Amino acid sequence: MRPLTEEETRVMFEKIAKYIGENLQLLVDRPDGTYCFRLHNDRVYYVSEKILKLAANISGDKLVSLGTCFGKFTKTHKFRLHITALDYLAPYAKYKVWIKPGAEQSFLYGNHVLKSGLGRITENTSQYQGVVVYSMADVPLEMKLCFLKTWKFSEIRIISAPMYLLRFLSCKQQQWSLANLN
């Protein structure tokens, strides 16, 4: 278990900043204590400094995990967020999308969301912006990339096409698909 290097920290914070923006500082300096990021077996863990001091007595080869796994670095040194980071990123998310109850199950099975299944969306969401997808009961479901701008959603309402497909991209697919879009 070691601290992240400057390059690893930069790559990880750029990925997290897609979802929470300037609220990144609130993730580290919390009112209930100071938290930090540590790397162990190419996985990044979010852990309290109190727990980190207690775990210093355990050797690295016997340590399985510590804290919450936020993501991992691939062999090409790209950072991928894991779903376990959702509970920590959701309260600080800048852009949010709410899905109606009828479309939740289909979305959770990996399908796209139709416009008729969209409850609401945060204003001024830009294209390819990281969003946190919520149910209408404000339960965070997933972190995705949004493919349409907010003003295009209102344009869709004017056209009144309820079956218009809203595309979201999974965190796991981001690296590959954005590289192929260019």
Image: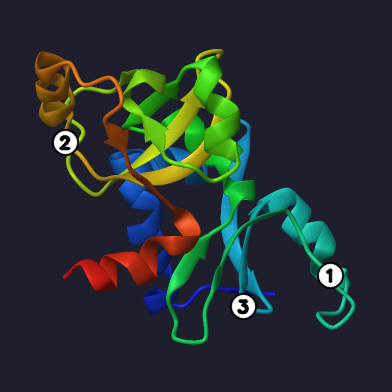
Q: What amino acid is labelled 1 in the image?
A: Val
Q: What amino acid is labelled 2 in the image?
A: Lys
**Of 56 and 113, which appears nearest the observer?**
113
The answer for how far apart the CA atoms under marks 1 and 3 are is 12 Å
Q: How is the image coloured?
A: rainbow
Q: Name the residue under label 3.
A: 42
**For numbered disc 1, what is the local secondary structure?**
loop
Of badges 1 and 2, the one in the foreground is: 2
The answer to which of marks 1 and 2 sits earlier in the sequence is: 1
The answer for how far apart the CA atoms under marks 2 and 3 are is 34 Å
| x then y, percent, for residue 32 | 63, 32
Q: Tags 1 and 3 in contact by the CB under 8 Å rule?
A: no
Category of crowding for the residue at label 2, using alpha-carbon neighbours closer than 10 angstroms: few (below 14), some (14–19), many (at least 20): some
Q: In this view, does 40 lie above or below 24?
A: below
Of badges 2 and 3, the one in the foreground is: 2
Q: Residue at x 87, y 71 (%)?
A: 57
Category of crowding for the residue at label 3, using alpha-carbon neighbours closer than 10 angstroms: few (below 14), some (14–19), many (at least 20): some
Q: What amino acid is labelled 3 in the image?
A: Asp
**For numbered disc 3, what is the local secondary structure?**
loop
The answer to which of marks 1 and 3 sits earlier in the sequence is: 3
The answer for how far apart the CA atoms under marks 1 and 2 are is 42 Å
Q: Residue at x 81, y 80 (%)?
A: 60
Q: Name the residue under label 1.
A: 64
Q: Name the residue under label 2.
A: 149
| x then y, percent, for residue 87 | 60, 36
